[in-house]
Amino acid sequence: MSSIMPAFRPACSNAKQFPASALRHRPERQSNLQSDLQSVPTHARRRRTGLRILMSLLATVFVATGAVAETVSGNDAISAMHRAAPRSPQHAGPQDRPQDGANAALVKTIDFVGLAEGMTVVTVGRGDSDLTRALAASLSNTGTLFLADVATDGTGGAIRASDEFSSRALQLSRKMADERSLFGKVVVVPFAPPVFADVRPPGGADLAVVDAPVANWRRSGTAHAAFKALHAALKPGARLILLSPSDGGHPGWLVQQAEAAGLRRAGEMEALADGRIGLGFVRPGA
């Protein structure tokens, strides 16, 4: 036992000397007590500042990632439409959907519209078109689509709520009942300026898409009332997208009417497929 202890004692002695050795390699520990006490608040402030910067960067990355994840591309919207209600065997799913010109045009239009999950969207004049079906499928689980139908006097003139609207609304409602998986959260409302009587809550729409024969609004004198109704349906900061024929669509006049109703131009005019242009506006106040 005694032969073991001498070998053990130096090890213990070295262990006792370790803190002193450590201090020799850390000059800041050799300062006097007063200096150490003065340095602690500074170090703490630096640590807190570093943590705040780190948390801010993480929050920024999280928000940006979330925004990207919620965006619905045109391809995603078309895929959702075909999954929810395939129209024919060749359209049974996105994997065997033909990449024809009509699909390409629809993809470009939806990408320009700027759809995101969870939105409340108002469409004007689209009926049960492919654009409406794609929007409805994309919002079926997270958002709401108000399908505002343009009721005319039968000659393309004044916009008004009428028996004609009731007939079309009934037809659309029947289609929606047959395709509940696609049109589960679609509400059909009349577009009868100056108000959207049935959009709830008032001023609660994140996006409005107008693809109606707005040239009729010019002839009938209802353009100002129509744009005021759209303005009232939107949240502050929400967007209005106008899809208009590039030939005879009167884009300058449309911009003038939208701005007169309190909307502000947002972005550049874009040439879409099928001979149409896209104009973007925003309701100020965000």
Image (cartoon, helix red, strand yellow):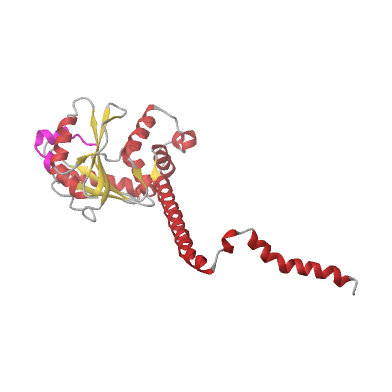
83 in relation to 48, above or below: above
Q: Residue at x 79, y 67 (%)?
A: 11
Q: Residue at x 23, y 27 (%)?
A: 246
Asked whether, in this view, residue 134 is left or right of residue 222, the answer is: right
For this orientation, the residue located farthest to the bottom is 1
44 in relation to 72, above or below: below
For this orientation, the residue located farthest to the left is 221
Which sits in the foreground, 241 or 266? 266
Camera sees residue 251? yes
* Quadrant of the frame with the N terminus: bottom right
- Where does the image place residue 66, in percent across and percent down from the top left? 42, 49
User: Magenta includes 234?
Assistant: no
Which sits in the foreground, 61 or 121? 61
- Where does the image place residue 123, in percent across and percent down from the top left? 26, 43
160 in relation to 2, above or below: above
- Where does the image place residue 81, in percent across and percent down from the top left? 40, 41
Q: Residue at x 17, y 35 (%)?
A: 255
- Where does the image place residue 41, in percent across and percent down from the top left? 46, 65
Q: Which residues are magenta?
A: 210-224
Asked whether, in this view, residue 172 is left or right of residue 85, the answer is: left
For this orientation, the residue located farthest to the front is 32
Camera sees residue 156? no
User: Magenta includes 216?
Assistant: yes
